[in-house]
């Protein structure tokens, strides 16, 4: 009969676990030795213990919500209760039951968080209602409607309050929007009476636009056209037939100017074509650095090429993206090689790899010793198991040595 702190194995291979209520049979293992029988059932306990520890970590870190956590606790508790395993099962149950207190605290925290969110939503809805009322009392006809739409989207994104509070705040907000819309419509009805005044403003804008059509001061004139366009929009509509005719003249002057500007830019692009050819040659030298053979030499060469690249000057706009992208890919390739060299020489990873090798070598030595004993005893079953175990561990050792060599 073989004993253990939390259990024992009887002569017939029956395994018992010790509890505060006495011994309980957890199963039989007639094919192996008593030590193997105990290990089989203590391994089961270790698996349960690992599951409890994992659940403790998930709950303590908040990785799982209170309701899901409670369900998991019940599931794990059921697995531990009357488990066919050898170990401190009652201690595990105590740890599982202790998680209920943590979950209750998390529930309260969630409840407080929800209450806090509702309180924050109340404050936000009061702010939105007040902002809408301020807009409704103002005269910002151009931006007010947009601002009210934005406030409506903000309102929709907030959680509901209790019904009476939510309805009261909504009535304030909705009433302000209605009042603003009514006043805005009245305002634009009055603007219809001012269309003749808009005609005079737009005629003046057309005259200035036509006077700028032949300008070659590209930057200032383009800015002035933007100003004229803004003034055009601000002038409001003229009578429809006049408005359309004035717009054709205004747009024609704009098109003439910007067409001339585009032609001038095309001429510049032709001038820069020679710079693009210089950069093409630089790229031939840069791209020859990849794949990298000597990192430091490649970095020095690339710095020289980058200086020549900057000195080459501007290139046509339609070539800029392609040329810059190719140069950037060479730079990224150099950086990638540099990063890889650092990764391979990382002392932390090397140390971990060496630690794995040491542990595997120790374990292999133990298996080899057991294998010698089994061969001496002529235990063919044991020999087969140990040889398989040894081959597996040797495979892992070879892989660990290769990894260590990569970091060396």
Image: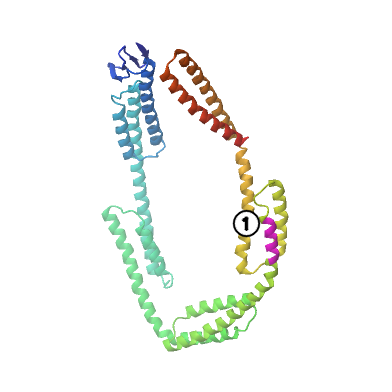
Of residues 115 and 249, the one drawn nearer to the viewer in this rendering:
249
Q: Taking 397 as reference, is 86 above or below it? A: above
Q: Dividing the picture into quarters, in which one does residue 304 lie?
A: bottom right
Q: Is residue 283 magenta?
A: yes
Of residues 8 and 258, the one drawn nearer to the viewer in this rendering:
8
Q: Which residue is mark 1?
A: 328
Report whether residue 134 is seen: no
User: Which residue is painted at 38% across and 62% down in the image?
Assistant: 151
Q: Taking 64 as reference, is 270 above or below it? A: below
Of residues 263 and 69, the one drawn nearer to the viewer in this rendering:
263
**Region rendered in magenta:** 277-286
Residue 71 position within the rendered picture, expressed as x and y whole percent measured from the top left: 30, 36
Apparent side of residue 204 relative to residue 218 in the rendered image (left or right) = left
Q: Dividing the picture into quarters, in which one does residue 179 lie?
A: bottom left
Residue 171 position within the rendered picture, expressed as x and y whole percent measured from the top left: 29, 62
Q: Main secondary structure of the magenta part?
A: helix
> Which of the image's four quarters has the N terminus?
top left
User: Which residue is painted at 33% across and 73% down in the image?
Assistant: 182
Residue 41 position within the rendered picture, expressed as x and y whole percent measured from the top left: 35, 22
């Amino acid at each position: 009969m073989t004993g253990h702190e939390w259990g024992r194995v009887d002569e017939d291979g029956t395994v018992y676990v010790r509890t505060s209520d006495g011994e309980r049979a957890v199963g039989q293992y007639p094919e192996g030795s008593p030590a193997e029988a105990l290990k089989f059932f203590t391994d089961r306990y270790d698996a349960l213990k690992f599951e409890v520890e994992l659940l403790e970590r998930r709950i303590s870190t908040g990785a799982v919500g209170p309701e899901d956590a409670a369900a998991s606790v019940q599931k794990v508790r059921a697995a531990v209760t009357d488990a066919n395993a050898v170990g401190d099962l009652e201690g595990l149950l105590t740890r599982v039951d202790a998680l209920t207190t943590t979950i209750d605290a998390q529930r309260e925290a969630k409840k407080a968080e929800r209450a806090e969110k509702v309180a924050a939503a109340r404050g936000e809805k009061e702010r939105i209602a007040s902002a809408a009322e301020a807009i409704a009392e103002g005269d910002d006809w151009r931006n007010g409607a947009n601002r009210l739409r934005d406030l409506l989207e903000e309102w929709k994104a907030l959680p509901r309050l209790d019904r009476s509070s939510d309805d009261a705040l909504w009535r304030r907000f909705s009433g302000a929007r209605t009042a603003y819309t009514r006043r805005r419509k009245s305002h634009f009805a009055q603007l219809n009476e001012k269309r003749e005044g808009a005609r005079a403003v737009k005629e003046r804008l057309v005259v200035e636009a036509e006077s700028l059509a032949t300008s070659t001061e590209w930057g200032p004139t383009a800015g002035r056209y933007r100003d004229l366009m803004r003034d055009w929009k601000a002038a409001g509509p003229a009578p429809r037939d006049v408005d359309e005719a004035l717009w054709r003249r205004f747009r024609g002057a704009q098109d003439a100017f910007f067409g001339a500007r585009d032609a001038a830019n095309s001429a510049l692009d032709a001038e820069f074509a020679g710079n693009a050819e210089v950069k093409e040659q630089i790229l031939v030298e840069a791209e020859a650095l990849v794949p990298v053979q000597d990192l430091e030499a490649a970095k020095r060469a690339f710095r020289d090429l980058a200086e020549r690249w900057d000195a080459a000057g501007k290139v046509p706009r339609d070539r800029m993206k392609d040329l810059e992208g190719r140069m950037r890919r060479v730079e990224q390739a150099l950086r990638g090689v540099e990063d890889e060299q650092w990764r391979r020489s990382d002392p932390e990873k090397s140390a971990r790899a060496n630690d794995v090798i040491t542990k595997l070598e120790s374990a292999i030595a133990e298996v080899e010793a057991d294998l010698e004993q089994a061969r001496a005893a002529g235990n063919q079953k044991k020999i087969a198991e140990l040889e398989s175990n040894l081959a597996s561990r040797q495979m892992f050792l070879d892989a660990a040595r290769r990894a260590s060599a990569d970091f060396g």
